[in-house]
Amino acid sequence: MSTVACRERGPSPVATQVPPPSLVPTATAGNSATGTPAIKPELVAPPKPDEDALPEAPGLAPERRAIQVVAGVERVVDADLARSRGLTLVDLSDDFAPFLFQDGKASDGAPLPNRYRAVFVGLASDHTDGDGEPLPPGARNYLELYGVPPALSVMRRRFLEDAARTCESTIDKSKLLAVESIETWGSSTEKKESAKHHFRGLRLEAAQKKADAATLEELAQKDPRYAKDVKDHRRTESQRAAFAEVERRLLCEGLLDASKHKEGFYDGAMRSAALDFQQKNAVFAQADLTRGTLEAMARPLLQNDFQALRRVLAERAAQAGRILEDGSAIEAMPLPKRGKLRKLPTYKNVAGEDVPVPDLVDQATDAVMVRLGLASPEDALAFFRRHADSDFRSLHVAVRFPPLPDYYGPHMDLVAEIDRGDIWYDFPFNAKGERLAQPREHFPSFTLFVKWRGEKVPLVHWRTTIGGWRSEVASDGEEYYRYKDSDVGPRVWRHVVAAPVWLPPVSAPLAAMVKTKYVAGAFPHVVNYDETGPGYLSAYGLVAGIHEQMRRRGETLSYYDNGIRTHGSFDYLSLRGRFSHGCHRLYNNLAVRMFSFVLRHRRSKVLGPMALGFRRTFYYDGEVYDMRLPTRGFYFQLDPPLPVETLKGNIQGKLQQPITGYVPKPGVKYGGQLPKAGGGPDSKAGGG
Amino acid sequence: MRPVAFLVLLGMACSRPSAPESTPAPAAPTPSASPRNPAALVPPATPAAEVPDESAKGADEDLRSEEREANPYSESVTLKLSIAPPVKALVTWGAKTVARVAPGNMDADIQRPRGSGPLDLEIKADGFLPYHTRLYADRNDKVSVRLCRNEDAPGLFGYKRSVEKDGKDGSEKKK
């Protein structure tokens, strides 16, 4: 058993990347009579004549009911008839969980319970926390960026609550959009910065008076020595004005608790509210008040809800249609010459024609939106007004999905490829401890291909991570740098693990293994299982594919696990250019979608929950803690295994091979001999 | 024996886990070519990760299915806690008292709704360090724990690190 995972600590180079297509809000422009930007204005009505409209079927048992909106009116139709007509039933119920989390059956018919399913459903519907325990009254899970999209009843509540708010008109959007971002600090620095701004204002005021200038700008013109100060002062003023609107917006949306917040300060309450806002609206910024955050705050509440609803329906559509293509495959195509458009990825259809790889997820989501009559936020509000919470116990919609490309089948010839991109093996610090520039233009990527008619057709192409220089606690208890490499060459995924468990190495800091948690009316110290999982915060995310090397000795075939996985990750910002400990991270929702797709289009069997029986008893701060992890996760076995090729990438710098051992941290005095670094899978990839 | 392995074994000396549970052994060391002086770094003779180490475990070595339950969809589950040595002890779950055990009956049986979340328990007994363990309510579960006397703290895994970090003996603080 490997005890490694691909976790990350410490500073790393940062680069920019656009979020994955599935998380990009789809509204871009437009203007309806209500001032609400339109989303996909072409999604108004099904094509006429509406051949997929089924007759009304009143009086059916709940399990046979589906809905359709026909000519603007919702009706109940027969789900069996829908299936027989080739329509897809998209599950809108709160009981939905992705395929990976469904229960299985053993070969003898015995049930194999997938225990994380209940937790996933509880999290999505705001009923439970990550342990499966009830949420305190009024608490909400905002876990979409962690791979758990909200259930439809949660979306219903958002729409109804937001439609009832009357505070939206008090927010000055022009002030929000007048700045590129708002600088924020910790509390002590914030006070200093605030004082600095105040005294600069006084200084400028005095100078303005002395220079007999009507404005600060005139002062800057008259005496250029003040130009920078005036510019800084104005910028800070604009940011303070925008900050006040952010406060108003967060209060309006019910995310900021005024009783815990001190006006004008970016305190814990406001930071937490900003993070909730970002998680709720799929804004990639961990509580930083970025331009994306401000733009989302400048949008009407219902508009944001509508975008969230589309993202939720995209996940439901992808699972119902067993599809994966999301338009990202174009990124796998070579960059075009200047002035040329990038070539679309194509495949050969049965007629031998080159046909573009479609964006099936987007098309299927459109189809769902159309069939539910959802062309605007107002349509969505009407939809949720006519459905009670109880409707979402078993609601389905019957939809005609786009035709599947010819390469689809029950056992597709899939192959995964990981390109490590630009690699620097050189130690990233000089002897003085200064960080050396190691720029990367080409970042690591993950591509899933299908082999079809002699070609490798890319289905998706996403950013991923590789290992790099990381801090590690050695056996002498000291911290060193170590290069955590990602294996190169042919490997396979034989096992896919839903809700995998990560085992912390013995060198893991003990403080991180204990936390305070609300438990049955008290806040005791408990073992921290967040990073071990199973759970969305696990170092392996919600799902992992284990990289194994097939080794043949004579007639014997064996598999070696060197600790590398392709796995989901809650640390979505790490996908923007940081390093892992050797594993290949994906956004949790995309990892769930991709491995669900793989399992449904490859021969596989359900192994079910695998025993682990891990136990570690440790002392911390005068108490004894007993970490127990009975399960490894819910296992699936691909048969045959799916090939995964990790490309070497483009080695930059002087070193052409990684350094295998520890390297002392510049400026740190060490006592004894340099310890030897472990060589097994536990320590090589080193985690996550 | 490597220091970390030694500490783990010392730690396990106070708690005797129930039969199938085990602590994984730390990875075996391999030779490394790490220079002291970062300015004099040279590449190693062989790439680090392109060829898995021979010490890498066979992937199926530890893979075994969980023991099947008679009814994995039953409404409730039974959680069993066994405590040693035989002393008077209080078992709490947050603010709730789950059991009081005493010599003669050191076991506690707890019925919980299936899937209702794990029970993070704390066991307190005079002369012993507070002990935290977890029982899982998504299946029938059982755990045996051996409490550690206050004076045994220095033999526990993590003691050295905890004391070095705090500069004091945490067990003293708790007395």
Image (cartoon, rainbow, N blue to C red):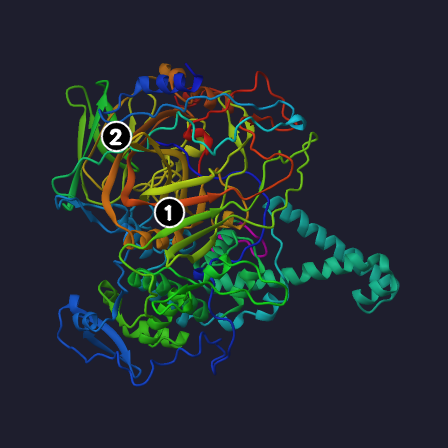
Q: Is the magenta stretch mostly helix, strand or loop?
A: loop
Q: Is residue B58 left or right of residue A221?
A: left
Residue A259: in magenta span: yes
Residue A611, percent from left and from top: 25, 34
Tell me if residue A256 can be seen: no
Q: Quadrant of the C terminus of chain A?
A: top left
Residue B12, percent from left and from top: 32, 20
Categorize mark 2 by other alpha carbons within 10 Å: few (<14), some (14-19), many (20+): many
Relative height, residue A6 to residue B123 (above, below): below
In the image shown, does A417 or B146 lie closer to the viewer? A417
Q: In this view, does B91 lie to the left or right of A361?
A: left
Q: What separation in Å lies between label 1 and label 2 (alpha carbons)?
A: 30 Å
In the image shown, does A150 or A584 lie closer to the viewer? A584
Residue B82: in magenta span: no
Write down the chain letter for disc 1.
Answer: A
Magenta-drawn segment: A258-267
In the image shown, does A232 or A444 lie closer to the viewer? A444
Tell me if residue A422 can be seen: yes
> Which numbered tag is attached to residue B91?
2
Q: In the rendered image, which quarter is residue B107 located in?
A: top left
Please name the residue shown 38% across and 56% down the image.
A450
Residue A339, percent from left and from top: 63, 67
Write down the chain letter for disc 2.
Answer: B
Type of amino acid under label 2: Val
The reply to whether discs 1 and 2 touch (Cβ–Cβ < 8 Å) is no
Q: Name the residue under label 1.
A: A536
Categorize mark 1 by other alpha carbons within 10 Å: few (<14), some (14-19), many (20+): many
